[in-house]
Amino acid sequence: MSRRGRGAAVPALAGHRAAVRLAQWLTVPVMMMVAAACSAEPEPGSVTAAPESPFADCAALAAPPSAASSGPVGPADLPDLALPCFTGEQPVKLAALRGPAVINFWASWCGPCREELPAMQRLADATTGRLTVLSVNTGDARDAAASFGAAKNVTLPTLYDRERKLAAALGQPLLPVTVFLDAAGRRHVDPLPLDEARLAASVRTHAGVTVTP
């Protein structure tokens, strides 16, 4: 090879080496990003923990509120069904509930329910010891219900009715639905969304309890 030919090969070789180094330099961060993305994926067989239940257990449902002592107490006019408590999953017999009580049916995917359920919590806080307030999560996924309850600070004792058995037995396919029981266990069903004022009026009329702010 002539001197001129060897001299022309040197710049070409240097350029090739520079291109290789540039490609390696660009490859390193890309590989790091891929590795980080892969490490963020859950390991095969791993299970994401479900949110804890924000709702109270159902132990208090076994005894009627003190307001019931002022009049006759009878079995609740409710279907002969048992539903699991959302927290703890112990079965609760609906007919064994005692009034005065308010039972609100809801689901996290139900728009009016999302407005109504926090009002039920405020009702429970305002009538502690005088009125039983509970909810029935209906046709919902447990994780979605727990997440919504936690986000809205709802701690009502809650029953879980994934198959909508109670709503079907009452002939109420749509949500929300609220059931009022007076001290004698007599039932009144309101299938319409309730704001604070209408809820207070219905509690007074159908459950015999005056709501104080």
Image (cartoon, grey):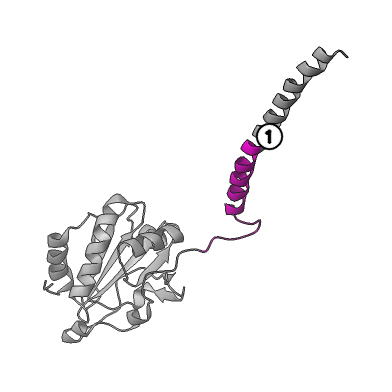
Which of the 4 image quarters holds residue 18? top right
Residue 18 against residue 65 in the figure, above or below:
above
Whether residue 187 can be seen here: no
Which quadrant: the C terminus? Answer: bottom left
Which quadrant: the N terminus? Answer: top right
Nearer the observer, 210 or 81: 210
Nearer the observer, 195 or 151: 151
Q: Is residue 52 left or right of residue 198?
A: right
Q: Residue at x 31, y 84 (%)?
A: 63
Q: Position of residue 91 (x, y in %)?
A: 45, 75
Q: Is residue 11 left or right of residue 56?
A: right
The three-letter amino acid code for the residue at tag 1 is Arg
Say whether residue 213 is magenta: no
Which of the 4 image quarters holds residue 67? bottom left
Nearer the observer, 169 or 134: 134
Q: Secondary structure at mark 1?
A: helix
Q: Residue placed farthest to the front in the image?
A: 3
Q: Position of residue 173 (x, y in %)?
A: 35, 53
Residue position for label 1: 21
Q: Position of residue 167 (x, y in %)?
A: 36, 59
Q: Residue placed farthest to the right in the image?
A: 1
Which region is colored magenta?
A: 25-49
Say whether residue 38 is magenta: yes
Which of the 4 image quarters holds residue 119? bottom left
Nearer the observer, 9 or 93: 9
Whether residue 91 can be seen here: yes
Q: Residue at x 36, y 59 (%)?
A: 148
